[in-house]
Image (cartoon, helix red, strand yellow):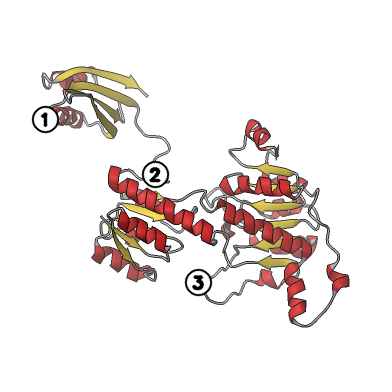
Amino acid sequence: MKVLVADKFEDSGRRGLAEAGLEVLYQPDAKDDALTEALKSSGAEVLVVRSTKVTRPMLETGHLSLVVRAGAGYNTIDVEAASERGISVANCPGKNSIAVAELAFGLILALDRRIPDNTRDLEKGVWNKKEYARARGLYGRTLGLIGVGGIGREMIPRARALGMPVVAWSRSLTPERAAALGIERKDSPRGVAESADVVSVHVALKPDTTKLIGEEFFAAMRRGAFFVNTSRAEVVDHAALERAVREKGLRAGLDVFEGEPSGGAGSVEAPIFQIPGVVGTHHIGASTDQAQEAIAAETVRIVREYKETGRAPNVVNLAKKSPATHLLVVRHCDRVGVLAAVFDRIKQAGINVQETENVVFDGAKAAVARIHLNQAPSAEVLRDIENSTSDILEVTLLPI
């Protein structure tokens, strides 16, 4: 099995893939048309990427069956196109959670103590202790979390260590789970905005989270509060954020932002960084040695398991709910042609098989096939299946 790695990837990860018996093609600079051609000419079945965009033309060429995003988010991959072609898309959730949480608190501390401003003045030879000795401090201030996934959960013990109570909102956050985490649950993002001195955003980019944080949210935030985003730029309405910084005295710490360059180096023309009270970093939330080694190890695990079993862990584009309405259970002798006869009858009836599983019993004399169907076969079809061969022992139909 060939694996094409189209981004910078740790040596340990490349060694791990090779040790798993995979042929590794390392082309970290392959992008756009060059990557499309590489996929076509190499015949790679697995593609590993980090920030490289994976487009429909790439997925429609060559022999790809698995794309692994060596990271958590997968918005740079055309998941819809992958799903249409039966290509699995897998990610590495949770492996960079600590790294991102550490950076988020770095930005919070930088905002509170104005560390970048301090440093700039010292570089210019300016001593201004009187100005920079004024800071509110974080102890007793309320941290508000938007999103309580892997990264959001890592924020909680770090906030606790600084003496910060936590309020949070997440679609999946129940009162019971909030109590177990030792935080206060809010019913909406606005509830967090109203209650927090510092807001930190940790949600994945999806259609329903695009510009989740907008005018109404910033209007609800306390004057002079801190806003930190280390998730995705598209989650925030940046025009509304700029207005809030200018008009409400909000301070913002951003690892992601509108107009962010796509490559590893370039120029930045984001006007928000010209506004006093805004600090930023270069989309480096997951970029620690610890996080990248953990992601590399997880990527190797995903590809190795796929090679050995045909199933990849952490696949994000499997159907949440199967269209199947009925389960056909066929107990049969484990002999050649039995299932072929069953599927032939199903095909003749115009019924679609959604999923199927055949489990063989000890001794390989009998097996049970579980066949998920998109509609119920008629009584006549069931009789035809049962009588199609003497090797069928029993046929049962169950509604799902």
176 sits to left or right of 123: left
Amino acid carrying mark 2 in the image: Pro
Q: Is residue 120 above or below residue 179?
A: below
Q: Calculate the distance from the C-alpha at mark 2 to the C-alpha at mark 1.
A: 31 Å
Q: Residues within 10 Å of mark 2 (few under 14, many from 20)?
A: some
- Marks 2, 1: nearer the viewer: 2
Q: Is residue 189 above or below residue 174?
A: below
Q: Do we see residue 241 in this rendering?
A: no
| Percent of width and height locating residue 146 | 65, 47
Q: Amino acid at mark 3?
A: Gly
Disc 1 designates what residue? 336
Q: Position of residue 183 (x, y in %)?
A: 70, 39
Q: Residue at x 78, y 83 (%)?
A: 125
Q: Whole-Å distance between the Cαs marked 3 and 2?
A: 29 Å
Counting residues from the start of the chain, the first of labels 3 and 2 encountered is 3
How packed mark 3 is, by other alpha carbons closer than 10 Å (few <14, some 14-19, many 20 or more), is few
Q: Nearer the viewer, residue 339 or 306?
A: 306
Q: Residue furthest right?
A: 130
